[in-house]
Amino acid sequence: MTDHRSMPNRLLVVLVAAQFISMSGCSSWKALSLNSDSKSKVTSLDKPSSLFDSKPNTRQAQLDLAIVAAEQHEAKEEYREAMKTYQSVLELDKKNSLAHHRLALLACRMSASKQAQEHFEAALRLTPKNTDLIADYAYWYYLNKQDSNATELVDQGLKREPQSERLHGIKGLLLTREHQWEPAVDSFVKSGCTTQQAWANIGHVLLLEGDVQAASYWIEHAAQGEQGSLVAKKTHNVLQASYPAPN
């Protein structure tokens, strides 16, 4: 990597990286998704409306109905209403880990960082072995550049569930930020990526960090050959057009 690119335009870097994320299929990018598997397994979003018209006569029925309603709000992207409904769940059951977990993710979407961490902590105290929760919280730490806390959570999770693709993906992000290239590639491969997809992921992380030169190196290699990452090829073309090498 001998060519020096011009100083990156921060907005353009973010836009290119956002495009990269939206096309990526690696599990790590989905770690904080509001559609993660942390939702209730026993309730359905297709409950008939008449169910809500009846008055439940047990506390558990009230909880079940409130969770269904909150999930419906999430499905419709009515996030503030979803938060209010999950809060009503906590009024009925202060130790409802699912409600705390969903509130943490919704608070992330609302950029309410302090509130998100409070609910992550509450959920983790209640269900410390929940791998989805651990992955979501670790990724939140990663996004907030609290890498030591993220690494600690990831390592704890992998001790319990060593095959977790999501945790391996987040570990790959953390290792990339530390410039530990070979371990990062290994972690991304364990998350379900091909080697070239792993290289593309490294490029993505570096791009978000603003290191366009290093990102271009990894993305260029990820895009090579018939087996090259389609995402990397598209991103490489965008980078070439945005940051042409000097003559």
Image: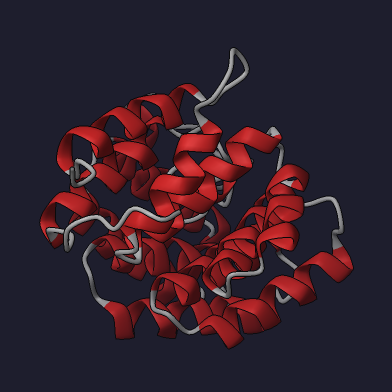
Q: Please state the horizontal and vertical placement of residue 167, each as a whole percent of the image.
A: 69, 59
Quadrant into which the C terminus falls: top left
Q: Is residue 193 left or right of residue 65?
A: right
Q: Is residue 200 visible?
A: yes
Q: Residue at x 68, y 48 (%)?
A: 188
Q: Please state the horizontal and vertical placement of residue 76, each as a whole percent of the image.
A: 25, 36
Up/down of 203 relative to 76, above or below: below
Up/down of 175 relative to 2, above or below: below
Q: Please state the horizontal and vertical placement of residue 47, each as a whole percent of the image.
A: 43, 28
To which quarter of the image does residue 235 belong?
top left
Q: Is residue 233 left or right of residue 138?
A: left
Up/down of 192 relative to 5, above or below: above
Q: Is residue 16 left or right of residue 232?
A: left
Q: Is residue 169 left or right of residue 4?
A: right
Residue farthest toward the top in the current orientation of the protein: 226
Q: Nearer the viewer, residue 28 or 237?
A: 237
Count how many numbered circles sit on residues in the image.
0
Q: Please state the horizontal and vertical placement of residue 230, each as a whole percent of the image.
A: 46, 21
User: How is the protein colored in the picture?
Assistant: secondary structure
Q: Nearer the viewer, residue 199 or 161?
A: 199
Q: Nearer the viewer, residue 135 or 219?
A: 219
Q: Residue at x 44, y 78 (%)?
A: 119
Quadrant into which the N terminus falls: bottom left
Q: Nearer the viewer, residue 123 or 56?
A: 123
Residue farthest toward the front in the current orientation of the protein: 247
To which quarter of the image does residue 41 belong?
top right
Q: Residue at x 53, y 83 (%)?
A: 122
Q: Is residue 193 visible?
A: no
